[in-house]
Every structure is written in structure tokens, then in C-alpha cells.
Amino acid sequence: MKRSSIVQAFAGSVVLLSLSLGWFLHSGWFFLTAFVGANLLQAAFTGFCPLAIVLNKFQIGRE
């Protein structure tokens, strides 16, 4: 699996999980959704993605 696909799958999973937690437990979890969205937006413009750096370090995924 390519590294970019791993990043997208992880981001999507975190968004869905935080939306569920915000809906069923506490609305404070929506801040995690906003953080992931903001991180995706800045990564589109700057190319800086913290998860990609972690995946590189542990040599996970191919590019």
C-alpha cells in the first residue's frame, strides 16, 4: 500500500471516529475532527504531513 493511501485512510478513520465520539459521548471530540481537517488542508499547500514523517521513520508503506 502506498504511503499516501495510508495517510488518507488514517485521516478518514480518525474523522469518522471523532465524529462518532462527538455525537455519542461529548462534543469536545469535534475539535479532533477540525484538527484533522486543518492538517489535511495545510498539507495540501505545504506538503508537510506529520504522519508521513512517522511512516517514513518506521519504513511503512512504499512511495
Image (spheres, grey):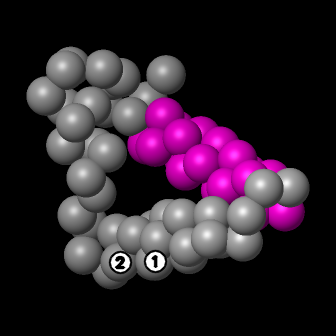
Task: Find disc 1 in the rendering and name its residue.
Answer: 38
Mark 2 or mark 1, which is nearer to you? 1
Residue 5 in the magenta stretch? The answer is yes
Please state the horizontal and vertical placement of residue 60, each as a whole percent of the image: 30, 20
Residue drawn where x is 28% and y is 43% of the image: 52
Task: Find disc 2 in the rendering and name its residue.
Answer: 42
Relative to 9, is 50 above or below? Answer: below
Q: Amino acid at mark 1?
A: Ala
Which of the 4 image quadrants contains residue 48?
bottom left
Please state the horizontal and vertical placement of residue 36, each as a whole percent of the image: 50, 65
By secondary structure, the bulk of the magenta-drawn segment is best described as helix
Please state the horizontal and vertical placement of residue 43, each as a whole percent of the image: 34, 69
Q: Does the residue at mark 2 contact the one at mark 1 (Cβ under 8 Å)?
A: yes
Circle 1 — which element?
Answer: helix
Magenta part of the chain: 4-23
Marks 2/1: CA–CA distance: 6 Å
Q: Nearer the viewer, residue 23 or 7?
A: 23
Q: Nearer the viewer, residue 63 or 36?
A: 36
> Which residue ends up furthest to the front in the rendered image?
26
Circle 2 — which element?
Answer: helix
Q: Nearer the viewer, residue 29 or 10?
A: 29
